[in-house]
Image (cartoon, coloured by chain):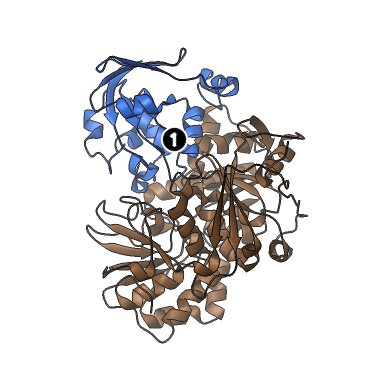
Amino acid sequence: MKGFVHKYKDNVNTDEIIPARYLNDSSPAALAAHCMEDIDRDFVKKVHAGDIIVAEKNFGCGSSREHAPISIKASGVSCVIACDFARIFFRNCINIGLPILECPEAAKDAENGDEMEVDLVTGSIKNLTKGKEYSVPPFPPEIRAIIARGGLLNK
Amino acid sequence: MAMTLSQKILAAHAGLDNVVAGQLITADLDLVLGNDITSPVAIKEIQAHGGGNVFDKSKVALVMDHFVPNKDIKSAEQCKCCREFAHAQGVENFFDVGQMGIEHALLPEKGLVGAGDLVIGADSHTCTYGALGAFSTGVGSTDMAYGMLTGKAWFKVPSAIKVVLKGKKPTHVSGKDVILHLIGVIGVSGALYKSLEFTGDGCADMTMDDRLTICNMAIEAGAKNGIFACDDITLAYLGEHCKKTPKIFAADKDAEYEREVVIELDKLKPTVSFPHLPENTHTVDEIGDIRIDQVVIGSCTNGRISDLRAAAEVLKGRKVNENVRTIIIPATQSIYMQALKEGLIEIFIEAGAVVSTPTCGPCLGGYMGILASGEKCVATTNRNFVGRMGATDSEIYLASPYVAACSAVLGKIGVL
């Protein structure tokens, strides 16, 4: 997967990813229409299919709302890279099949608008704009199995 | 290998003699919880994957608390979805308007969680039940759906931070001040993926309400769970509320902890978290002149009877400042009734506060106290993120019910 970077700082919380005032509707399209609204008002206008969200520490902290990864996935984002993730957000992404990678070096180097390429099978992350390459260890087999079947509930 | 208290509970529910930090396990659940925001996503997932029945009608709890009584048509549809599912599936613990309360105050009160239980809930503050000696953690809706169908969940076994509480709290210092202080020390990701295990002689000075408040906010340090070992205080509470036989676990004496944090309770002061992260803590004596527009006393963190009593002690015979809209929300119907019997509701109304039926409402910016641009609020809730209670440039200051009530009277953040 290849796309352009939308870069954020530490401690982006799920209220910022999808504010609670929109949680009265759980349809992916309705949630995508307000993705990142309180931290980046123009995100919805800027984002293109395949783009990559890159953030620093503790991305997705706060509320357990699965609406947050659902809104990111439905907005067309292909992958989220961060130094690390809040744990509920992390497992929600795995459970709904939104690829996420923990890679502090790649996360810190990336800037808004960089073009990046990610290979989930090999764990390779390339920042094409900066000409840098990083690698992350593969997920454990149990987690890979959930991702491979496209989500926890899929057989 | 020696295990922490949290690891002991996980191992027992996974049918394993031993687990180590980082190990992936599948474990049997004693309770699966959801609310009116997270359950509809889980229910629709189940329906989209061919349906199925809940694994145990007595081990699923659905609590309508976030946007209830319904704030708009869409919220009403979400509750309808939950209600129809609960009735079709015969879910025994479905709590609708009239019986409901804020989930994390309601479930302990109803005796649905016992010591040694393993609980997941599609709400991040599910970690509250660690106060009862349970391993309890927040998950998303897909985990909830899977848990409802199978009675199981996958876990990465956490390592732990030992929090040693020493001595006794001074007057007007509560469990809220203890947890805000701890988050100030370790930060909002200080316990990421880890357990917070509370221990030390100071536990004897922690009432069950203090413990519930402390474990409730473990997530605000990034923790997977917060937990107190089951002791006489736990057994007394469970004896009053819960019919289950307590399963008592203890950490091994030589269990490994990643870090130890000591809190000397007698040195604590009332503490306030400034916008926009719970880790931005200041003691109340070092706060300047911050005028406020609203006070909210309630939530799964601080809407229990002892919280209302602390607020009433301040507000009795006083009036809230004319510039401060003061909103008080008992967390459950039973707490509401108790407050009524004790005359607390009368004290609040006489003081110029409003009292609401139980709801999460303003805590997450749902309704019942939304802030306008630039407004400031002292809240006994758990998060002060950007836009959490309304406009993105409004500000939330987290504090105890005592500090919140004093601030309502003063019109600025402080104590009387």
Does B174 appear above or below B104?
below
* Screen quadrant of the C terminus of chain A: top right
Q: Is residue B99 left or right of residue A56?
A: right
> What colour has chain B?
brown
* Element at label 1: loop
Residue farthest along the bottom direction in this orientation? B317
> What colour has chain A?
blue
Viewer-nearest residue: B212 or B416: B416
Does B83 appear above or below A34?
below
Mark 1 crowdedness (10 Å alpha carbons): few <14, some 14-19, many ≥20: many
Viewer-nearest residue: B228 or B326: B228
Task: Please indicate, yes or no, whether residue A68 appears anywhere in the rendered image.
Answer: yes
* Screen quadrant of the N terminus of chain A: top left
Residue farthest along the top direction in this orientation? A122
Does B169 appear above or below B146?
below
Q: Quadrant of residue A119?
A: top left
Chain to which mark 1 belongs: A
Q: Quadrant of residue B118?
A: top right
Viewer-nearest residue: A136 or B14: A136
- Residue at (67, 37) in percent of width and height: B151
What amino acid is labelled 1 in the image?
Phe
Q: Position of residue B268 (x, y in %)?
A: 48, 67
Residue matched to label 1: A85
Task: Please indicate, yes or no, whether residue B100 appears anywhere in the rendered image.
Answer: no
Does A29 appear above or below B413?
above
Q: Position of residue B56 (x, y in %)?
A: 69, 42
- Residue at (54, 20) in percent of width and height: A144
Q: Position of residue B3 (x, y in %)?
A: 70, 41
Q: Is residue A43 left or right of residue B146?
A: left
Q: Position of residue B307 (x, y in %)?
A: 51, 70
